Image: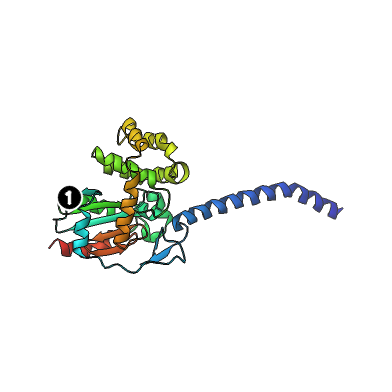
Amino acid sequence: MAIKKSANVLEKLTPILLIATIVLAFVVGNLWEKVKRLEGGGGTTVAGTTQTGTQAGAQQPAAVTVTLDNIKEVFQKDVIKFGDGNKKLLLIEIADPSCPYCHIAAGKNPELNAQAGDRFKLVSDGGTYVAPVIEMKRLVDEGKASFAWVYSPGHGNGEMGTKAMYCAQEKGKFWEVHDLLMTNKGYELLNNTVKNDKTKSGELSQFLASAVDSSFLKGCLDSGKYDSRLQNDVALSQSLGVNGTPGFFVNAQNYAGAYSFKDMEPAINEALK
């Protein structure tokens, strides 16, 4: 009789255990997917920061010595730039709008910053991380620095987003489009929906409509006028020895990874003396 009761109890519990197992598998799988995104498919660790866009085990080019003259030359090229090479402080960001650590450095996606761990938790959320891109823009707005933004395929899904920023620059709306793409919604859109698909220009343009006219943006994206510009940016980033994202320069000082602005402040203060 006891055996029969146990069998009945087990029979009732089986569906519950099955459902619980499915739910647990879904949660674990979802968490694993987010971790994989943050890792960017593998990479090298630079100063404790995963630098995305570098395939594990791939042969790396020889180190490149970058001088201040090399940095000044960037401001003479056809890149997104604010200011010229004559400022005492020259700032360069090499990035990919689909790259998770570029989002972390941009400071507009606090959800991703929090997921990456305490080291990257923003000051505004009770952490210690100061997003460098926000502070670099502030220095440009204050007239203390020049800034250039260069594309490199650090995560693989940033081509359409980058071309949208090129188009927006024509209208003086680079930062407005940049900041929207660097939100959590922008990250999900580029990595889960657009994924470099040119036929998704309409969806991308609608997402950015609050920053720049959607009809203009769609027409610009569909024209293909900036397709070759991507490769020019990539070649430039490689000439500076940057093969992952994000990569920053404060004058000739290279910061390979999503460093906090605090780490860059000594070099910035020295340049501004």
Judged from this view, the residue extending furthest toward the top is 215
Looking at the picture, does residue 126 appear above or below residue 159? below
Q: Secondary structure at mark 1?
A: loop
- The percent coordinates of residue 29 (x first, y second) are 56, 52
Q: Residue at x 43, y 42 (%)?
A: 189
Residue marked by disc 1:
83
Along the line of sight, which residue is nearer the eye, 184 or 10? Answer: 184
Along the line of sight, which residue is nearer the eye, 54 or 123? Answer: 54
- The percent coordinates of residue 43 (x first, y second) are 43, 62
Looking at the picture, does residue 60 appear above or below residue 198? below
Task: Specify the color scheme.
Answer: rainbow
Along the line of sight, which residue is nearer the eye, 40 or 20? Answer: 40
- The percent coordinates of residue 135 (x first, y second) are 24, 53
Q: Is residue 21 visible?
A: yes
* Number of numbered labels in the structure image: 1
Left or right position of 67 against 32: left
Looking at the picture, does residue 200 appear above or below residue 37? above
Q: Is residue 106 visible?
A: no
- The percent coordinates of residue 34 (x first, y second) are 48, 53
The quadrant of the picture occupied by the C terminus is bottom left
Along the line of sight, which residue is nearer the eye, 9 or 98? Answer: 98
Left or right position of 31 against 256: right
Q: Residues within 10 Å of mark 1 (few under 14, many from 20)?
A: some
Q: Residue at x 29, y 63 (%)?
A: 255
Q: Tell me the amino acid under the disc marked 1.
A: Gly
